[in-house]
Image: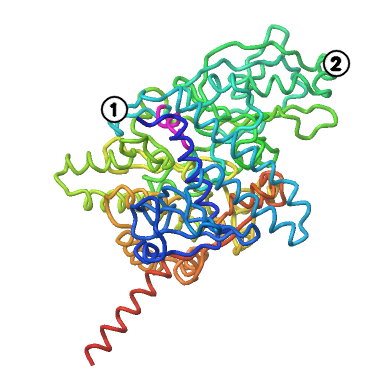
Amino acid sequence: MHSAKKVAEKASYEAFMNCYIREVGDENWVKKNDLLKLFKLPYIFNGEEVLELVLPLQQKRLLVEVNYRSLVGKHKLGRVYHFDDKESVWKEEEPLNCMISCIQELNLQAKNNNCHEMTSHYDELILRLIDSYHTICTYMEKSYFKNNDKRVEDYRFLESEQSLLFGHWLHPTPKSRQGMATWQHDLYAPELKGSFQLHFFEVDQSIVKERIYAGENSSLIKDELLKKTKEGKYLYPMHPLQSQWLLQQDYVQKAMKDKLLNYIGPMGDTFSATSSIRTVYNKDTNWMYKFSIPVKVTNSLRVNKVHELKAGVVMAELFDKIDFLQRNECFRVLNDPISFSLNIPGKKENGFEIILRSNPFKEGEGKGVHSIAALVQDPLPGEESLMGRLVRNIARTYQLNTEEASFQWFQKYWQCSVEPMISLYDEFGLALEAHQQNSLVDVSKGFPTHYFFRDNQGYYLSNSKKEKLQNLVVNLKNAPELFFDEEMIQHRFTYYLFINHVFSIIYRMGEDGLITEEKLVQWMIIELKNLKQSLSGEGKRFVDFILNNKVLPCKANLLTRFHDVDELLTDMEQAVYSSIPNPFYLMLSIEKKEKHYATASSV
């Protein structure tokens, strides 16, 4: 029997330690048999290799059991041991103690480097680590044994959005939600499947600002979404968590005294949180609402910025002006073409900013649509991942072995998601922040048929294409924050599209025993080389960058968290980046060596 606490502890430990290994760790891979020759271990390790981590500033050595070593993703970790110098033996360590030791090592490194402003944040990281662990435990306790035997192809959109019990697999505190009280999770956390009414303010027309690109009359859209009262004022919706925060702010209280707005309270239809928490969904409405909320989710306080309101509208216009989506029918974008805000004296951004996202997943239309994050999430003990269940069902349906079913699934997914994204970047200098939670796929027929991108915070336009794009959409001149230099885009696009997104699929298939990671990486190398022949600009240089660099830039979520960086508030929303060994380069190097040996032996 697996207790909720043990499952939550294991999930927290694996997420954190994989971040530490990838971003920080002074690690050494040791063959299990070599280790057994030197030490008597209290436990027989499952894998062929173990990972030794050195924490030099604490004079501490850790030995981590590795049940599955991944070429591209996270490792499946088991027990952890510390070396007892006095007795010269390895002793089992509690996972939480291990994680806190690693945080303390970061703290000591910062002190040694005279980064005193950094050392002051290590307690914040410990707090979020424990908060995330307790949150996972709570979700497990409240949903345990309520496992869904429904076919993956038959899930509804909201069911998939609510299934992420463990969260972001590349983040050290995946379920950290500072600012949300314990009792509020039942209503507002997607994992607990709550629903709630929006809260409304009665707002004077003079302070409402709208930004709309919907191909229709602006005022009609505004009046449809913001209902008018008998007094001619608008009913302005807000997330319940945000409304309670707003009511405490001095400038809101002053605006209420000045009769510019008035708090009404909850009313109307009920909504449910999607996986981002702050974007809410109702199966009968044409729009999802994306609000600011006073909650720190993973790295950042989730706040809608004015430039994001502009970005959603101007990007909806850009996609309307180019014919890319018409030429790539399996590739779709969930636009955010409408936003509202309030002009409150003295506050450019005041918390009333709302983004409206198109909702193609109304009742009867969202069957089989999953985020990649949901498909690749680790399964509950004794169960299969959604990806594993999906692939094995495809194998049964089409009478394929699991390797062939996996290979075909990956090929079809690549063709409707990755290829179009690289082509979009090549042709228009437009890269998407396509991480696994922003990436949705329709698997209602088993194999992928459509890919959907969402998130108006996730657009990067190349400075080299600025004039071309501004000629298409004049309003882009008012959104300079969307444009970046090519090097910056390459780094971000590499991380989001490959490391966070595509590699997560490969890891999941490999760890589930469906197909080896090496086969999929080798196939990708061939596809990227073939794709490169049809590219001419940014996309071609991006493919070169991906294939030929020894290391790839990788967002360092642990270091971002340790340094207490809120990436949504920093210049150019820049998190901390590090680098990881490039699996493409590694595989190409192995191929070159094999060819060299084959040539030498034939001489």
Foreground residue among 55 and 230? 55
- Which residue is labeled 1 in the image? 149
Q: Is residue 278 left or right of residue 205?
A: left
In the displayed structure, does residue 597 sit left or right of residue 304? Answer: left
Q: Is residue 442 left or right of residue 287?
A: left
- Determine which quarter of the picture holds residue 369: top left
Q: In which quarter of the image is residue 182?
A: top right
Q: State the residue lying farthest toward the bottom.
A: 603
Q: Residue at x 31, y 33 (%)?
A: 152
Q: Name the residue under label 2.
A: 258
Q: How crowded is mark 1: few (under 14 residues within 10 Å), some or many (20 or more)?
A: few
Q: Can residue 599 be seen in this view?
A: yes
**Furthest residue in direction left, as rendered:** 399
Which residue is pictured at 69% across the width and 6% down the height?
230
Above or below, 569 against 24 in this view is above
Task: Inspect the image, locate mark 2, and give the three-letter code of the amino acid beneath it.
Answer: Asp
Disc 1 residue type (three-letter): Asp
Callout 2 secondary element: loop
